[in-house]
Image (tube, grey):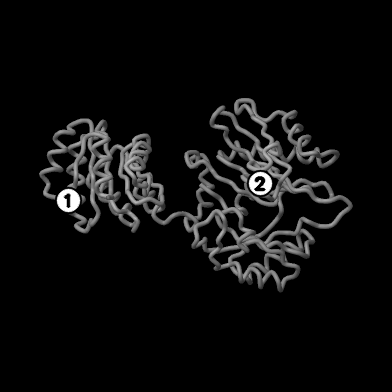
Amino acid sequence: MNLHEYQGKEILNSFGVRIQRGIVAKSAQDAVVAAKQLTSETGTSWYVVKAQVHAGGRGKGGGVKLAKNLQEVEKISGEIIGMDLVTPQTSAEGKRVHQVLVAEDVYYPGESETEEFYVSVLLNRSTGRNMIMYSTEGGMDIETVAEETPHLIFTEEIDPAVGILPFQARRVAFNLGLSGNAFKEMTKFVTNLYTAYVQSDSSLFEINPVLKTSDNKILAVDAKVTIDDNALYRHKNYLDLRDIREESAIEVEAGKLGLNYVDLDGNVGCMVNGAGLAMATMDLIKQAGGEPANFLDVGGTADAARVEAAFKIILKDPNVKAILINIFGGIVRCDRVAQGVIDAYKNMGNINVPIIVRLQGTNADVAKELIDNSGLDVMSATQFQEAADKVQEVLA
């Protein structure tokens, strides 16, 4: 579950991580009120207005702007709220902005210069350990840094059973070239950031940039946070942070129906039971010359109602030119799935794309006979290659 910047910062702050303070606003008038409150609490006279959407690169799309007075806060907020923000991480249509974060200006003048760093915490799946990835090149796309100057990216692997050790936090600060009070601040920042990552059951904490202010404070200017959905039962308060407006409408609907669905850009819809078989089916479609339009795992109970719901979800995508149903009959019998497909097809009555049904496992022969004798425009298969050939045929 992805969070907005202001929500991620609230979690960070609760674990003692210093943040750029801000107040969220849903209208230009609310933004002015927020700015006045920030001035009374922090003394700031300049403000940063940030669009709150689940996408990076907001500044490049005009979603992050500096306001030097209250009049500019109102004007800029009015322009950003309601806009369709296009960034390198959104579609061409962009994402509608419903709210902004009015934040304090932390780039204030001082005796020493400010510096920006990149710091993230994530899981290294190849080693099974948590990892802090960091760089002196903050404020930039980390992918660009990795490609052009990989020697400027450092990593610190942490044994999850032990946790971050003091020498590891110090090594991060040392590699970032810090000294004095800034060094101490960074070790505390990194330690608290790792604690927030673990105790919130997150899969990603990305802070870009982490700022060293002119008075040697270390704080998070931005926050990209992804919570592990499988751990939300331990953090029921986090459920209120979900913003379904930022998610695919089809995926949200599928979730309500208990279907594991991910929307893709292809032309062949998939309906499969089991995540592993679903991945193999997507490979099958690619080999047949098509592109998967979705990942859809209907689970072990592929009855008529569930199949019909899956059909409706898949057919919401206008790019779907064919549907491949690939079911392994282990927990559920193939003939019951076949009957479910037939019943769903008859109930809907408006399926105008070719359907290939590949059923293998318990009662697969009975299932094939049911499909073949149904009188419906449905093609049956029992082998992977046979299904691939039929996909290739209907796409030709």
Q: Position of residue 322 (x, y in %)?
A: 28, 50
Disc 1 is placed on an element classified as loop
Instruction: Tell me the tag on residue 44.
Output: none
Task: Indicate which label's residue lies in the foreground, 1 or 2.
Answer: 1
The structure residue drawn at horizontal position 62% and vertical position 62%, both measured from the top left corner, is 63
Where's residue 177, x and y in %? 80, 38
Residue occupying image coordinates x 76% and y 46%: 218
| Foreground pick, 237 / 366 | 366
Residue type, label 1: Asp
Relative depth, front residue between 393 and 315: 393
Toward the right, the furthest residue is 111
Mark 2 falls on what kind of element?
Answer: strand
* Above or below for 32 versus 309: below
Q: Is residue 343 above or below residue 108?
A: above
Q: Is residue 233 left or right of residue 302?
A: right
Q: Where does the image place residue 24, in percent across and percent down from the top left?
A: 62, 60
From the viewer's perspective, is 318 left or right of 235? Answer: left
Q: Quadrant of residue 100?
A: bottom right
**277 relative position to 239: left or right:** left
- Type of amino acid at the residue the image marks with label 2: Ile
Which is more N-terminal, label 2 or label 1?
2
Place of residue 292 in the rendered image (x, y in percent of width and height, measured from the top left)? 36, 46
Q: Nearer the viewer, residue 387 or 252?
A: 387
- Per the rendering, the mark at residue 207 is 2
Pointer 1 local density, CA inside 10 Å: few below 14, some 14–19, many at least 20: some
Residue at horizontal 68 percent and vertical 38 percent from the top: 153
Circle 1 is placed at which residue position? 377
